[in-house]
Amino acid sequence: MFENIFAGFTLLMNWEAITAILVGVLAGTVVGALPGLTSTLGVALLIPFTFGMPPAAAFGLLGGMYVSSIYGGSITAILINTPGTPAAAATTLDGYPMTQKGEAGKALGTAIISSFFGGVFGTVALLLIAPILAVLALKVGPPETFLISLFGLTVIISVSSKSIIKGLMSGAFGLLLGTVGMDSFMGYPRFTFEQIGLYEGVPLVAALVGFFSIPEALTLAKASQTVQKVEAKIGKVLLSLKEIKSLTPTFIRSSIIGTIVGIIPGVGTPVACFVSYNEAKRFSKQPEKFGTGIIEGVAAPETANNAVEGGSFVPLLTLGIPGSAQTAIYLGAMLIQGLRPGPALFSEQGPVVYSIILGLLIANIFMLLVGLAGVRLFAKVLKLQTNVLVPVIITFAVIGSYAINNSVFDVGLMFVLGLIGYLMRINGFPIAPVVLALILGPIGENAFIQSLSMFNNNLILFFTRPLSVVLIILTVFSLVMSIRRELRSQE
Amino acid sequence: MYPRGILLFIAVLAVFLFFNPQNQIKLVISNLQRGLKSYAKVVIIILTIGVFIALIEPAGIYTVLPLFSGGIMYILGVREVKKLSLIPVFLTVIVYLIFTIVLKVPVPMGIFD
Amino acid sequence: MFKKRGLMFSLVALLLVGTLALVGCGNGTAKEEAKYPTKPIEVYVGYAAGGATDISIRMIAPYLEEQLGQSVVVVNKPGGGAEIAFTATAKAKPDGYSLGIINTPTVIAIPLSRTTNYKVDDFEVIGNIAFDENVIVAKADGKFKTLEDLIEKAKANPGTITLGHSGLYADDHLASLAFQQAAGIQLKDTAFQGTAPSLVSLLGGHIDVVVGNVADVVEQVKEGKLIVLATMGEKEHESLPGSVTLKSKDFDIVMGSYRALAAPKGTPQEVLEKLRDALKIAAEDPDYLQKAKDTKQPIYYLDADSFSKVLKNDQNRLENLWKDLNLPTQQ
C-alpha cells in the first residue's frame, strides 16, 4: 500500500496538479460563500474543465473545489447570517452572534482552523482505514437510517435556545415542508399545488437561501431606518494557543462525528453539523453560552462538515457507490477519466486513487492558507453600508437560487419562503430547526417506509437489529438529557 | 396521514404556546407597539423584490439588476446620484464576471437570448 | 432640487421604457435556418449533473460541437422526475437552439401516470445516444443463486422478497413490474432515492434483490460481490459474460433506458437534417467510441427513424402494462 501512496504522491508533484488544486480552492471558497451556489454545483461546473486534464490534476481541481466550498459557506454564515451552503447552516447559530459582538474575525479564524482540522482528519481516516469504514457503511440499512434521522431531529431541542415550544413548532413546520412533493411509495402528490417544481419536494437550496437571506436583508433594511452605519468591529483573527487547546476535544469529537456521518450514504452534511453542535453543547461546562457567540459553537459544525468529505469518499472509492451528491459527480468525472470505481479500484489503479486522496490533503492545506490570508478581506464585507448590503444580499440570493435548477420558479419559491422566514424571525421563531427538519424529514420518512417493507410491517423487528437498538437507546438518552438541560437553563 | 399528524402536532404546540400568558401578552403588545407604520419601507422593498423576480426571465437579469439595486438603495435613503448609478453598475459587472464568465452558470438572459 | 429629481426620474423612465421596448421586440427570421447554427445550442437534461444521463450527453457533446461549429451547452433542469426538462424541451421555441434528452421509459411513463403539459408526440427525434439495459442482481453469498431460484422462492412466499429500485415508475421499477407480471410472482418493491442507495442496502444484506442498470453494477459483478440473476437486453451483455437474459428464459421482456436527443415538434426540416447528420457523424467518431469503451459507457446510436420505432414500441408496451396492472393514471 505504501508504495502506491508514494506513487500517488509523485503524480501530484507537478505544476499542473498543484495549480489545479489552488484554482479549485480559490474558486471553491467563492462558490461556497455565495448563497445558493452549493459545493455540488461547484464540482459539477468544473467537470467540463477536467476533460483534457490528467487524473491527478483533474481530481485536484475538483477536490480543491469540494473542500473549500464546504469551508466557504461559513464565511457568509458568520458575516451575514446566510449560510453559503447547506453545510454551513449550523454555523450561523454561534457565528453570527459572534459577528454581532464584534468578534467576526475570531469567528472566521475559528471556522478556517476547524475546517482544516476536520478536513485533514477525515482524509487521513480515508487514507488509512477506508476498508474498515466501508464495512461500517454497509451495516447501516434503512432502519438505522431512520433512527439516525430521528436522533438528528432531537437535536432541534438544543438548537432552540429561547423557547423549546417555538423551536418545536419550527421543527414541525420544517417537517411539514418536507412532506411536500410526491411521496416515494405511491407517488401521491402532497401540497404540490399543481406545480411541477414542487413534485420532488421543496428544493433545499431555495429554502435555505430564502429562509436565511431574505429575513436578514429585510431585518437590515428595517434597522437602517434607525441606525445608518453599523460600526463593524472585526476584532482579532488568530486564535490564541490557549483557545486552540481548549477546542481540541471539540475538534476530535466533531471530526469523528463528521467522518462517520460522511460514510453513511444518504445522510447529509448538515446532520453532522447539527449533531456535533449538539454534542459539543452536551459536553460543555457552560452549555447555556451556546447560541450567544462562542468559538465552540462555530468549531463544532465547521469541523464536522469538513470531516464529512473524507468519509463521503469511502463508499465511492471502496464500493464504487457515491455516498453524497458531490461524490456522485466525482463518479462521473472518474468515468470520464477512464477510472472504474468499484471494489477493485484500489488494487487496479492504486496510484491514481491515492493521488485523489492526497490531493484532498493538499487542498486542505491550501484552503487553510487561503482562509487565513483572506479573513481580513472577507470581513470587509461588513464595512459595506446597509443600503448597499441589502441589494447585494438579495441579488445573490436571487441568482443563487436560480442557478441550481435553472428555474425562476425556484427563485419565486425562495422569496415566498423568505417572507415566511421573516415573519418567523420577527416573532421569535428559530430558523435552524426548520432547515434541519426539512432535510431529515424526507430521509427519515423514506427510510421508515423502506424499513416497513423489510419488516413486513412488523415494527418489533427493529429491536432485533443490534445497531438499531443502540441507536434507539442513544436517541432516548439524548432526548431526555437535552430536555433536562434546556429546562434547567430556562429556570 | 403523516402530514396531518404534523399539523395536529403544530396545533397542539400552538395551544401550549398561547396558554403561557406571559408569551401571549408580550406578543400582542409588541406587535401593536411597533405599529404597522414602521413596516412601510419593508413592504415596499418586498414589493420591489417581487417585481424584480417577475422581470428577470423576460427581460434578462442584466437589464433588471442595475435598476433593481439602484431602486432598493433609493428606497433605503440613498440620494447621491453618483452612488445610485455607480454602485448598481459595479454590482452588475461583478455578478456578470463571477457568474457568466468565470463560473459559466446559466442565468436568465431575457432579451439577450 | 426639483430639477435634479426630475432629471433622475426621466432617466429611470427612459431606461424602463427602453427595456420594455426591447423585450417586446420579436426575433427569428426564416433566413436563419439555412445558416443554422449561428449561436450556442442548449440541451436540457432532466437529471442532476454527474448522473448517468448527464454523462451520456456530456461525452458526445464535444464531438457534436465539432460537427455543428457551435458550442453545445448542457443545462440541467432536474425536477418532477425529469418532467420539468421534458416539458421545457417540448415547449421550447422550435428553432433548433433548445434541445433536450428524452429518457425512455420515463418520458412515456410520466404522462401515463399523471396529467402533464407535454405528450410523447411533442418531440422530434434526432437520434439515440445511449441504452442501458436493466438487470436483476443479488448479493453474491445471498439467498438466490439463479433466476429460477428467485422465482421459485417468490412463488412459495408471495410478497416477502424485497426488491430495491431507484424510484416510482423509473425504468428499474417498470422493469420490475414487467418481470413480476411475466413470471407471475409478487415481490415487495421498495423505492430508494436512486440506484446507488439501493445497491448499498443490497450489499449490506438489508434487501434481497435490486433492479438497476448494467452500468451501475458492472464493477461489483466483476469483483464477485454481486451476481446477475438476469439481464433484460436482447442478447447477452458484453460486459457481463455468462449472464442470462430474460428473453433466453422465454420471458418476452426487453427493458432498459434509452437516452435520445430530441427537438420540439415544429422544428424546421433543414435544422433537423443538420442535427441528425451531425449526431450520426459524432456518434461514429473513433475517439468517442474509444473513450466510451474505456469507461464502459453504454453508448448505443440509433438514427431518428429506428429510434422512433423503438419509442412507438415502448409506448404500446407501457400502455398495455398500465392497463394490465391497473396502474394509476391520475395523480
Image (cartoon, coloured by chain):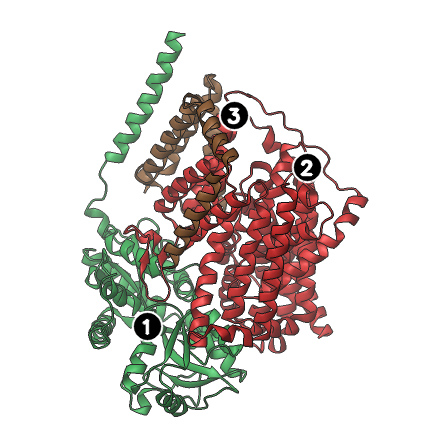
Viewer-proximal residue among B104 and C29:
B104
Q: Position of residue C63 (x, y in %)?
A: 39, 63
In this picture, residue A55 sits left or right of residue A405: right
Q: Residue B101: give x, y in percent of width and height.
A: 47, 44
In the rendered image, residue C166, in percent from the top left (x then y), is placed at: 40, 69
The chain to which mark 1 is attached is C
Q: Quadrant of the C terminus of chain C?
A: bottom left
Label 3 sits on residue? A223
Cα–Cα gap, marks 2 and 3:
23 Å
Query: Which residue matches tag 2?
Result: A105
Residue marked by disc 1:
C301
In terms of sequence position, does the residue under pointer 2 or pointer 3 come before the other?
2
Please tell me if label 3 and label 1 are on a single chain: no
Query: Marks 2/1: CA distance?
Result: 57 Å
Q: Residues within 10 Å of mark 3 (few under 14, many from 20)?
A: some
Query: What is the secondary structure assignment of the residue under circle 1?
Result: strand
Colour brown belongs to chain: B
Between the residue at mark 3 and the residue at mark 1, the CA separation in whole angstroms equals 61 Å
Choose between B15 and C208: the one closer to the eye.
B15
Q: Is residue C40 left or right of residue B87?
A: left
